[in-house]
Image: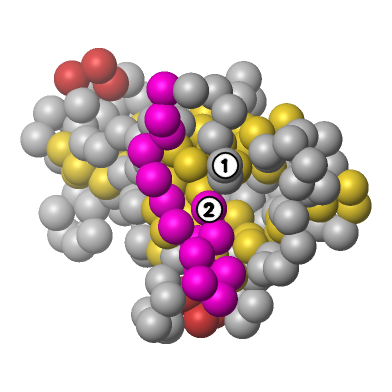
Amino acid sequence: MQTGNQELHVGPASPGVDAWRAGAPEPALRLPFEPSILTKGAEDRLVLAEAPPTAEAAGVRVEPFVNPARQLRLLARFPAGAAPRVNGEPAPRLAVLAPGDIFRWAGGGSFRLALYVRPAVGLTPGAVIGKSCPVCRMPLAAGSTCYACICGVAMHCERDSEAGLSCAPLSRECPVCRRPIVLAEGYIDPPVHED
Ligand SMILES: [Zn+2]
Ligand SMILES: [Zn+2]
């Protein structure tokens, strides 16, 4: 069972996420969970570097985090004098960005934040064996395949209905948190606004 199956990616706002999907020559950057520094290289190409120990760096210091509602967000600290804008509006130097947000700083280049999901499908983890599936109310058995929603709930997920229950593939959303069930790896765009 995978955990941390969501990632934040950042790339050019234009031509946009469809082009990232198509494997554009400049693919989006995956933001690691550690603090890192975004700078603009030639022709406003984004460059990602490990954050130096000093707090004040030349670029934008970014760090993904999970908020209390278990949503992935990006804490961005723009350099002094960068005049950041988020979705066209002036933004504070320290800003929380959500998937779908478009941001720019210090002139030139607009960038978009996107949510990339790798489905959490795997063998039933020990912690939920014997608990009931929220879709069919039958217990989750050891050795069967299940899908874990980011709210923490697990449900049956056999791809082949001969092999067992296919509760996740047959449901559009998690019955507990109402988030969509995502079984295909890729960008969720337009993003789901849960706020
Ligand atoms: Zn089930
Ligand atoms: Zn859920």
Q: Is residue 153 visible?
A: no
Residue 175 point in image, percent of width and height: 56, 38
The amino acid marked with disc number 2 is Thr
Residue 155 point in image, percent of width and height: 36, 38
Please provide the residue range marked out in magenta: 39-53
Which of the 4 quarters of the picture holds residue 49? Answer: top left
Q: Which residue is mark 2?
A: 39
The amino acid marked with disc number 1 is Ala
Kind of element beneath mark 2: strand
Which of the pair 175/161 is nearer the observer?
175
On whether residue 46 falls in the magenta region, the answer is yes
Determine whether, in the image, residue 52 is placed left or right of residue 113: left
Label total for image:
2
Residue 114 point in image, percent of width and height: 56, 57
Tell me the residue at 18%/20% (across/down): 126
Tell me the residue at 23%/52% (across/down): 158
